[in-house]
Image (cartoon, rainbow, N blue to C red):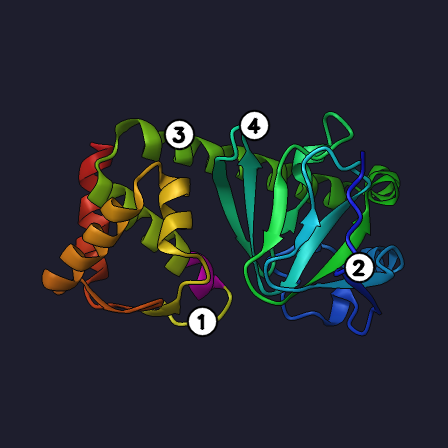
Amino acid sequence: MQTTLPTVRVEPLRTACSDCNLRELCLPVGLNALDMEKLDGLISQRRVVARGEPLFRSSDRFHALYAVRTGFFKTCLSAEDGRVQVTGFQMAGELLGLDGIASGHHTVDAVALEDSSICVLPFDSIEDLARDFGALQMQLHKIMSREIVRDHGVMMLLGSMRAEERVAAFLLNLTQRLQARGYSASELVLRMTREEIGSYLGLKLETVSRTFSKFQDDGILDVRQRQITVRQPEALQKLVSSAAC
């Protein structure tokens, strides 16, 4: 049964892909001007999702991909006993909804961690357009491949890394993604809670908090609640590199 989402507002699209400053991180990467114009014609809606509200729920019918324009999301699975497993965090320039392609229904919840906006890409139209020009099809394949690689990375985190190594890998990945969007590689504000980080990394809340405190004591981080300053990125990289050996 499809979930009703009254808190998701629909707005007219004000900025096309061709004018968007995230186009080199999102679906239009590598498209020429003519192909970009065709893609612009498919995207007619932008949705605004309030903090804490879902963009879609597990078992909702799949009909579109969603490009995050502003804000931050988490994807998560809910068990029958009420436990929630965070499966990923998505930021501006990344796609949501790929989980629904195979079965026609979403398999995770996508919840906004702050007030966010997304562009709606009707999947049937995207598929039709991808058949007409290979650049878009190739980009879709690259995005799907990137998700597979990311899943493999999470499996490595959960399967072989110690707590400090998991948190270090998480912070490095986050800062690298933010830097690609023009933000500081050393100053960041965590949109997710320590508990959500722990769920994603397979760690208890106390372990995550203790690891952040240790990194601060060691001079690697400066931690002020959710505001993080990375003082020694090389120390984080050393922890991750030692785990990969």
| Residue type, numbered disc 4 | Glu
Q: Write down the residue under mark 3.
A: 155
Residue 91 vs residue 21, the one in the foreground:
91
- The image position of residue 180, as x and y in percent, is 47, 62
Q: Nearer the viewer, mark 4 or mark 3?
A: 4
Q: Quadrant of the C terminus?
A: top left
Q: Earlier in the sequence, mark 2 or mark 1?
A: 2
Q: Secondary structure at mark 1?
A: loop
Residue 194 vs residue 43, the one in the foreground:
194
Q: CA distance from mark 4 to mark 3?
A: 23 Å
Q: Residue at x 44, y 31 (%)?
A: 152
Q: Write down the residue under mark 2.
A: 36
- Residue 220: say if magenta: no
| Residue type, numbered disc 1 | Tyr
- Magenta highlight range: 176-180
In the image, is 130 to the left or to the right of 223? right
| Residue type, numbered disc 2 | Met
Q: Write down the residue under mark 1.
A: 183
